[in-house]
Amino acid sequence: QVQLVESGGGLVQAGGSLRLSCAASGRVFSIHTMRWYRQAPGKQRELVATITSGSSTYYADSVKGRFTISRDNVKNMVYLQMNSLKPEDTAVYYCNFLPLADWGQGTRVTVSS
């Protein structure tokens, strides 16, 4: 059974940093592309960052240069380092496999101006 547990969210001032973590289980982690998504209040969930099994990375234009996705295939973890945070980054952040599995509970990030 797939399980995704996100953590690391919180309240931060604009310009600050947070590091999100995702513990993934239920699939052979190392062979899967992993993604971070976010859903802001009243908006649809959007893709933020992708890391392939070979550790190639891709980012949404809105976070490029500020966010960094990484993975640890020994610990079955994926991370999202978020720097220079902006109020528009406020959202619940989720990780997931590709192809998608059931969503976890997410971790809430609030950026104050």
Image (tube, rainbow, N blue to C red):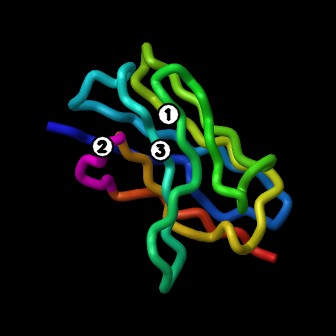
Q: Position of residue 70 (x, y in %)?
A: 59, 31
From the viewer's perspective, is 49 left or right of 111?
left
Nearer to the camera, 88 or 61: 61
Q: Position of residue 3 (x, y in %)?
A: 25, 41
How far apart marks 1 and 3 lie (CA) works out to: 8 Å
From the viewer's perspective, is 21 left or right of 81?
left
The N terminus - image quarter: top left
* Quarter-of-image position of residue 20: top right
Please determine whether, in this image, residue 18 is positioned above or below residue 22. below
From the viewer's perspective, is 23 left or right of 52?
left
Type of amino acid under label 2: Pro
Q: Are discs 3 and 2 less than 8 Å apart at CB?
A: no
Q: Magenta region, mostly helix, strand or loop?
A: loop
Residue carrying label 2: 99
Residue carrying label 3: 35
Check disc 1: other Cα within 10 Å, few if <14, some if 14-19, many if 20+. Answer: many
Identify the disc placed on residue 78.
1
Mark 1: secondary structure? strand
At 21% across and 31% down in the image, what residue appears? 26
Dot 1 or dot 3, earlier in sequence? 3
* Quarter-of-image position of residue 63: bottom right
Mark 3: secondary structure? strand
Residues shaded magenta: 98-104
Q: Is residue 57 located in the magenta-colored stretch of the structure?
A: no
The C terminus - image quarter: bottom right
At 52% across and 20% down in the image, what residue appears? 54
At 44% across and 54% down in the image, what residue appears? 94
How far apart marks 3 and 2 lie (CA) works out to: 10 Å
Nearer to the camera, 52 or 8: 52
Check disc 3: other Cα within 10 Å, few if <14, some if 14-19, many if 20+. Answer: many
